[in-house]
Image (cartoon, helix red, strand yellow):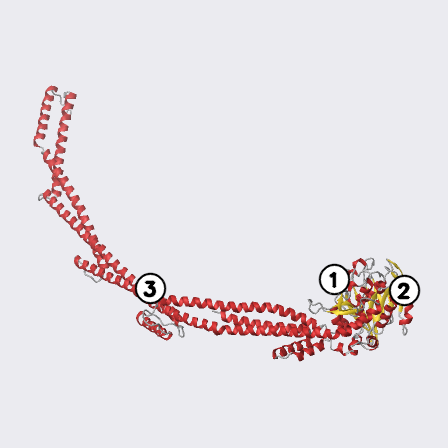
Amino acid sequence: MRYNILAFMNTTPAAQADPVFAECSSEHVFSQITTQVTTPELRTLWARMQEEMSQQGVEAAKSYLGGEFTRLKAELEQELAMIVLE
Amino acid sequence: MSHAMYRIERITIEGFRGFTEPQTIEVCGKNMFVFGVNGQGKSSIIEAIRWGLFGATGSQEIEVRNTFYSKGECAVTIGLVSDQGRLEVRRELRPGTNSSRQTIRDAEGKSVAEKDVLPELARIGHQEGTQVIFAAQHAGGRQAQVDITNFTRVLCFYLRLEKVPELLEKLEDLVEEREVECKAAAQQVENAGGKIRGQLQMTNNQIEEILRNPPWGEGPTPSGFETEGKIKALLEDAVATRGVPRPKEGSTLTEVLAHLKRELERVGVQKSSNLMTQYQTLIKQAETAEKKLASLTQARVNQASVAEKVMESEKQRDVALCGETSEAISARVAELERTMTENVAKADLCNRARSLSAEYGWSRCPVCGTEHDTALTGKTLEKRILTEVVSLASTGPDPTVLVELRTRVERIKLIEDSLLINRRLLETANTALDDARTQLVNAMPGLDVHGVPTVVQARIDELRRAAAVVNGEVVDSQGHRTVWAKRVKDLEQELVYHMYRDKKERLQHRLNEGLEGARDALRRYQELLNTAARLQQILEKAFDDALERARPPLEQMLTEVYQRLTRQPSYDLVQVFAPPDQRRRRELRVASTQLPGQTFSPSVLNGQAAKALRLVPYFVFSRFQPEIMELELLLIDDPSESFDTSHVSELVGEVARAAEHAQVFVATHEQDKFEPHFATYFSTECPVTLCVTGFSTKGGPILARK
């Protein structure tokens, strides 16, 4: 496949001229991920991370995931504390 | 053709690099070429635009100040214009500060936020973007502020793919960090299991220790219910027989035993103390009575002895008096003594008369004065005196009688003195006897002790026996305390046994089932970790797929521009290469149609081609999304440094193509090579050309608009 580079450079932006570039954006990749996460746990995690990202950006998704880990760690520590409490 | 929203209308520069006093350059929204020889300030104009919009980082910030400018001010003001209005972007580095401050004002002079009026520009920040300063002149080792060193970042930015690697990096960091934490947590769970097993072993040992000498004796092991019954029975027994108060309502069995232990000890000690006091009282009474009895006996002996002495003295006195009284005898002695004294005096008088007679010669009577014969008179008188003296001696009392009487009187006196003393002693002995009797009576109230030592002794013996009985009770009391203490201790041990047995059951439960909760929590943690890692893998693949989709058209675009700029005969292709050992990284490489399947580092190119290759991505990428850029600029400093004359035409052509969507600022010293091509490539609107015709330290660059 050859691309008529001069043609689209002189007329329209690449992303609009060629659908290949349109499918290279973060939004497109993220929407692809949505179709690829098939297991329930992946689906729910990704949905929640996407929601965080849509509202407050990538850092928020990390914060959410980090918070989940922290919560589970706290649960684990609580269980451990109950076990060794004698 | 799409245009960005804003274009630069004018630039005012003061105290920035080569500039001193404020100079304003009118651009009128057009493209601009700045011509001039090197070192006179044309690059300062390109850099002023870059700094005014984005600032600089670290030490580069203070390097922009012109230290020769006496006012110390450093500021760049960029006027922007669009069909929606005007903005004024001003960045200044105030004297004495080392960081700049940017302000943006709208047409009314009101301060506005960059993110509100120029959101894309705010997003680009200091990083790679449409703006290029291709600093061919690295004066003082200064690096190009923006270049394509991080090709992957530039690539993702222009593809608007940057969120994916950003998320991937964060996800990767998080997963790595949490993997370590997960391993540590798994170790914690393992350690908890080990700790429980250790506790279980210790508890088993403690149970075995109790069973070696069971407190319940030889019988079967009591149940917890039975032990509870024993404790309650012990409590009732202690309350009934030892007077122990009941524990407070709702006390646990352990508390009941502790209460019993404490109270039994208290009651036992109290009872022993009372008995001991009683014993000591009895002993003391007996000892006191014995002492008093001994005192009484001694007083009686003393009294009897003294009485005997009195009687003896009275007998002796009677014998000495011999029926007389001592007064009569004394009178006789006095009479005899008087008679004898008189006789002696008479005899003495006679003797003196005789002496006087002898001395005076007796011629005349000394009494009547009659004269007489002295010798005769003397002899007669002497004779008569001698007769008188003899008469006195023969008729006077017998001196031996007087001596005897005197001796008798003295003896009687001695006997009476002794009698007097003995009578006084007897009085004292009688008083002592009465005192001793009184003390004994006081020491043994209610007992008739008058003259009956045997009764007293019997009472003392009775006290001794009572004391012995009490002493026995003391010993018994101590024995009781020991017995009760053992009963409590045995039940305590029994209770401890049940506690250990319960603890053992709990530990076994925890070991078998309780750990499951921790394992579940750990499993959930691991599942989330696995899910995050899986998501990272999916994202990684999607990211690679996206770049792979973009790669063929990108490579074709890059190759087209590259070929126009360099006309390389051998390495005629540009490829986007993914290093196998560096995740998510992409780099530009060259290839040859003559060597299909191979790529080469740009280092194989000559200097001109290699540097041209660095410009290629900007010419390509800057066309991608101009419609969303509120301000799109292409800033190029001395681009022809790496090009031979034959390729300047192509370079101007590329710049002209970029100028179709971006506002272009080019600084070059090769005015003669660039200007001839303007008519060819800038047919619709000729760019503004500005010439730097001179430079002075005080006045800065001398600008002339052509």
Say which amino acid is labelled 1.
Gly
B34 left or right of A37 in image: right
Binning the other alpha carbons within 10 Å of mark 2 as few (below 14), some (14 to 19) or many (20 upward) gives some
Task: Determine whether the residue tagged by mark 1 lies in a helix, strand or loop.
Answer: loop
- Residue annotated with mark 3: B269
The picture places residue B510, in percent across and down from the top left corner, at 47, 72
Task: Determine whether the residue tagged by mark 2 lies in a helix, strand or loop.
Answer: helix
In the rendered structure, the residue with mark 3 lies on which chain? B
Dots 1, 2 in contact, CB < 8 A: no
Which of labels 2 and 3 is toward the front? 2
Say which amino acid is labelled 3.
Val
B518 left or right of B696 in image: left
Q: CA distance from mark 1 to mark 2?
A: 34 Å
- Which one is earlier in the sequence, the residue at label 1 or at label 2? 1
- Residue annotated with mark 2: B671
Q: Nearer the viewer, residue B704 or A3?
A: A3
* Residue B367 visible somewhere in the drawing: no
Binning the other alpha carbons within 10 Å of mark 3 as few (below 14), some (14 to 19) or many (20 upward) gives some
In the rendered structure, the residue with mark 2 lies on which chain? B
Q: What is the tally of numbered marks visible in this picture?
A: 3
Q: Nearer the viewer, residue B330 or A41?
A: A41
Q: Which mark is residue B58?
A: 1
- Which one is earlier in the sequence, the residue at label 2 or at label 3? 3
Binning the other alpha carbons within 10 Å of mark 1 as few (below 14), some (14 to 19) or many (20 upward) gives few
Say which amino acid is labelled 2.
Gln
Dots 2, 3 in contact, CB < 8 A: no
